Image (cartoon, rainbow, N blue to C red):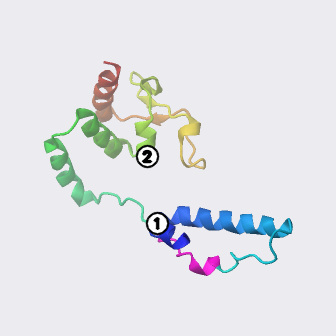
Amino acid sequence: MLRKVERGALSIAEKLRCWLIDIFRHAMLDGLIKTNPTTDIVFLALPKPAQKNNSHLEMQDIPRFLIALSRYPGDIQTKLALKLLLLTGVRPGELRFSKPEQFDLDNQVWTIPAGEIKQSKRLVNAGHVIPDYVIPLLRQAVNDELT
């Protein structure tokens, strides 16, 4: 059973392995079994693959990316979001879950609530200062969201 799961998601296989070990350990403590048949499962589980993070754009690739983005036939919100990610450097989730009320466009500040920041060690005081050239994109994104 564990081998079938290993072909799918490794995290599920690891969870299943831990559950089985705990179940049989509990059965031993209750006197239902004499030995734990899961003691060798550790050797069956595959090692976790190295985590591959999304790579960043190299400086020389940005012009080509912007040209491709301008030709992208998809939704305008997708295009705006990609431009905003590039210009602000925030994490995709911080942008994706942002709300119009977080943006003070007159004072050029984007306040991201501390609970929505992935890295708690990354300090955000009052908010991110938004450069002048980003404001038109944000106005367009916020206006599209409200309509």
Coordinates of residue 37 in the picture (x, y in percent): 70, 77
Secondary structure found at label 2: loop
Taking the image as shown, residue 124 lies to the left or right of residue 134, namely right
Q: Which residue is mark 2?
A: 91
Identify the main secondary structure in magenta.
Answer: loop
Q: Please tell me in which quadrant of the rendered image residue 55 appears.
A: bottom left
Residue 140 vertical position relative to residue 27 in the rendered view, above or below = above
Q: Residue at x 25, y 39 (%)?
A: 79
Question: Do the residues bearing badges 1 and 2 touch, measured as CB atoms within 8 Å?
Answer: no
Coordinates of residue 115 in the picture (x, y in percent): 58, 38
Q: Is residue 90 visible?
A: no
Residue bounds of the magenta highlight: 41-51
Outermost residue, front side: 32
Q: Is residue 141 within the magenta segment?
A: no
Q: Nearer the viewer, mark 1 or mark 2?
A: 1
Secondary structure found at label 1: loop
| Quarter occupied by the N terminus | bottom right
Q: Nearer the viewer, residue 76 or 66?
A: 76
Q: Residue at x 51, y 73 (%)?
A: 3
* Type of the residue with mark 1: Gln
Taking the image as shown, residue 81 lies to the left or right of residue 95, namely left
Coordinates of residue 2 in the picture (x, y in percent): 55, 70
Could you give the CA–CA distance between mark 1 and mark 2, rounded to whole angstroms? 18 Å
| Quarter occupied by the C terminus | top left
Q: Is residue 46 within the magenta segment?
A: yes
Q: Please tell me in which quadrant of the rendered image residue 82 appears.
A: top left
Coordinates of residue 75 in the picture (x, y in percent): 23, 35
Q: Which residue is mark 1?
A: 51
Q: Nearer the viewer, residue 55 or 10?
A: 10
